[in-house]
Amino acid sequence: MIRDFIKSREAILVAALIALILVVESRFSGFAAPGNLASVFNDTSILIILALGQTLVILTRCIDLSLASNLALTGMVTAMINAAMPGVPVIALIAIAIGLGVVMGMFNGILVWKLDIPPIVVTLGTLTIYRGLIFLISGGEWVNSHEMGEAYKAVPRFDLLGLPVLSWIAIAVIAGFAVLVNRTALGRAFYAVGGNPHAAVYTGIDVGKTRFAAFTIAGGLAGLCGYLWVSRYAVAYVDVAGGFELDVVAACVIGGISIAGGLGTVTGAVLGALFLGTIKNALPVAGISPFWQLAISGAAIIIAVAFNAQSNRKQGRIILKSAEHAS
Amino acid sequence: MTLTRRFAIGLGIAASLMGSTAMAQDNVRIALVAKSLGNGFFEAAARGAEEAAGELGNTEIIYTGPTSTTAEGQIEVINSLIAQRVDAIAISANDPDAVVPALQKAMQRGITVISWDSGVAPEGREMHLAPSSDELIGQTIIKLAADQLPEGGKVAVLSATSTSTNQNTWIEEMNKVMDQYPDIEVVATVYGDDLADKSYREAQGLMQSYPDLDAIIAPTSVGIVAAAQAVQDEGKVGEVNVTGLGLPSEMAGAIESGASKSFAIWNPVDLGYTTAMIAHALATDEATAEPGAEISTGRMGSVTLDDSNSAAMSEPFTYDASNIDEFKGIF
């Protein structure tokens, strides 16, 4: 039954996404063309990858606000290495980015696991720490496109079977997540830990360790995105992806990932990210005043949350009918 | 304003933070407050201020600012500078009004306060040094686009936030001289919020909405870089020329690829230099900030204050393929 429920929610999200694309198409013809939709998907790839990482964390009743700072720091590190040592191959830089992201994710995870600090506090702290580190290592200097190697910038743009590599990476991550979340013990443990931590302990799941794993995976993905972001926009500076952590959380929420944990799907997160990404891409071409753009994004989030709250409302069970009448 | 010589004794944390030595007691300490740290423009201005300090002698430049571009952050910085009892504060404000009370407090304590680059409301400063006049900038940005379009064409503006004072004034000034360019049509003004990703997306949107667009004018350093990258990625180099205001070090790639033929910026090194010169002159009572006053600014000549006690340094300088290599290493 729950399965049907979730299915229907995703169906609604797909319908909303199609409706959105059609509305934009009516104002700006050519938006719904396959080529343009592919470029919207490509533009949303980074958001999708991060939203999937965030999904794992939120499933375990945690939240990671440091993802965007993690992304910015790893992006800056790879850009600086590339600028200083052009000989280092891009694949090594990607490995460094993922490794560094994993370390930052593990740091969050350790604090949540071993010191039992609320995740929102931990990641609010590391959000500023990671952001501050960028300033320390870069001294506030930008790394500009002409300082980056051609290969460094070319990888996410490289065309493979009609789609840029950036899109393929997102597709690979989505596929990996579908397997991880649905087909592995760890994946099911994320749901168990978020759904009912106490019950999870009795089934032999280590709650802290599972959360640690979620933070680590999310951190690694943020690291990967760090490279992708900096190479896509061909510039690294302190404020890269400032405020992006909130977009990531918003994508999850729109996708029906319950902030209370234990509820949500990979498809939902991907659709949530696509919905937000479509809005971001549509607003510039739809000729809507910038003053409305933020309001529209915000309204979409609230509608999604209101809808989720409605559908997640548990059917009450009356156990003591007489007692209720007495009161 | 009389200059009171301050003693390091008793300054406690402030003094130790600044690394003051016994010699520092006689130094004129000028605080250069940036919109935010980590911006190449302000780093370059700080270098210019150091250059002025070297020429003046006995002058110490304290380059500081918040880590993000907020007025709140600047107010904290101002308060800490008041506690450190600097001799002069020269600020590029994130908000013209929000920082006024803190700066008034500084002036009451005998600190010389001037604004530079992005101004402060007149009641919050003694004078303002604009890098260039708004008229000159507005005229320059449209001229840069028009010079590449002898046949006329369609141009669009990619600005920072819709509320940023600088950009709005420049666009206004640009519109005032549009009648000199009858063949140039400004088709849209969009806002990239000085975020690389949003600016990139807005630039893409412009090229989609106006397939025959000829130029994008971005009077903001983040926007111009993002727009140039978007033009390159869309394969429209040669069709769409990106121009506006940017930094040579950040724009070198765009000039090289041809996405941008030319752009302009005042020289931030000169701006920092001039700011420090003026702050020093006012703090040592060599000059007074009053309408009509002429203040000597070393190698930059001099500036003259207008009725609202503001002055313009010089007109923006144009950078293109011929001089980009010379300047990209500087700022």
Image (cartoon, coloured by chain):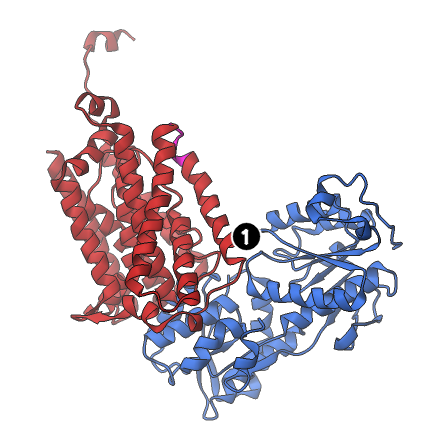
Tell me the residue at 63%/58% (across/down). Answer: B34
Residue at figure coordinates x 23%, y 52% from the top left: A16
Which one is in front, A64 or A296? A64
Residue at 40% x, 70% y is B203
Q: Quick check: B301 left or right of A43?
A: right
Residue ID for mark 1:
B68
Report the span colored magenta.
Answer: A116-120
As for residue A300 lying within the magenta part, the answer is no
* Along the viewing direction, whichever of B274 and B190 lies nearer the viewer: B274
Most extreme residue toward the bottom, as rendered? B151
Q: Quadrant of residue A167?
A: bottom left
Question: SS at mark 1?
Answer: loop
Main SS of residues in magenta: loop
Q: In the depicted view, which residue is nearer to us: B108 or A226? A: A226
Q: Is residue A118 magenta?
A: yes
B319 w.r.t. A135: above or below:
below
Where residue A4 appears, x then y in whole percent? 11, 39
The answer to whether B330 appears left or right of A23 in the picture is right
Q: Residues within 10 Å of mark 1 (few under 14, many from 20)?
A: some
Residue A276 appears in the picture as rendered: no
Residue B206 is situated, as x and y percent measured from the top left of the image, at 38, 73
Q: Colour of chain A?
A: red
Left or right: residue A110 compared with residue B158:
left
**x 35%, y 44%: residue:** A103
Quadrant hosting residue A325? top left
Query: What's under tag 1, amino acid-wise?
Result: Ser
Q: Colour of chain B?
A: blue
Rendered image quadrant of residue A77:
bottom left
Chain letter for mark 1, please.
Answer: B
